[in-house]
Image (spheres, grey):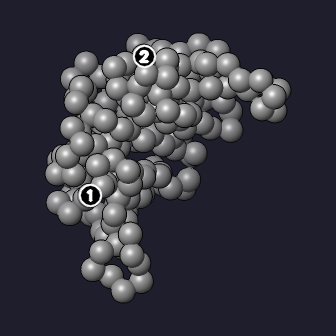
Amino acid sequence: ASYGTIYRSKDGGVNWEIILGSGNNVNSDLAMTQTGLMIAVVGGEDQTIFRSESAGESWVDITPLDFPTDYLRLVPDISASNDSIVYVIGNRNNNDEEHLLWKYRHQDDVNTAWTDLSKNLPNSFNSQSGYDLYVRISPFDTNFVFIGGTNAYYSTDGLSTSSKTFQFRGYGRDDHHP
């Protein structure tokens, strides 16, 4: 992933081909499993979330119909223990007050489910206008999720509530300067 474009090399980096984006988009990111399942996010004018089961040979737009269109950057993660689970975190309108967090569950090409978990993000979550965005799912428990901005948090219930999300690094702590 680079500025507005997702590239792929099939020869160890000697040659590269564009597989998504046009270079005009603001941000792009990619998560990939060991089996080649990929989730790609492309911001800017395309603003789309894609899924590929073919190591990037073909892509399906999985963006939910009610997904916000005013985001600037998205970061995805795929669960290592259950690759049907994906979390996507992002910032909206270059505003450190507004962020989004969605969970995707893939069952088959017809049955998919998106859940908006944005309201469960910590009130103090700050990404410095999208510069500091991080989401990772524990490889052992899909409900143990780490999110980060200028502060680092973990949730023991997949952020399905705000009561089980805890700050463990960041501002207000002696052991970290974001």
Left or right placement of residue 19 versus residue 171 in this view: right
Q: Amino acid at mark 2?
A: Asp
Query: In the image, which is nearer the foreground, mark 2 or mark 1?
Result: 1
**Residue 81 in view, yes or no:** yes
Left or right: 4 as drawn, with respect to 157: right
Residue 79 is situated, as x and y percent measured from the top left of the image, at 52, 44
Residue occupied by mark 2: 61
**Residue 100's spot in the image, x, y percent?**
26, 42
Residue 126's disc is: 1
Q: Is residue 105 visible?
A: no
| Residue at 49% from the left image edge and 17% from the top image edge | 22
Relative to 118, 45 lies left or right:
right
Image height check: is 33 above or below 122?
above
Which x, y percent locates residue 107? 45, 25
Q: What residue sits 71% from the left and 23% below the top?
A: 16
80 or 95, nearer to the observer? 95
Helix, strand or loop at mark 1: loop
Residue drawn where x is 54% and y is 34% of the image: 2
Q: Secondary structure at mark 2?
A: strand
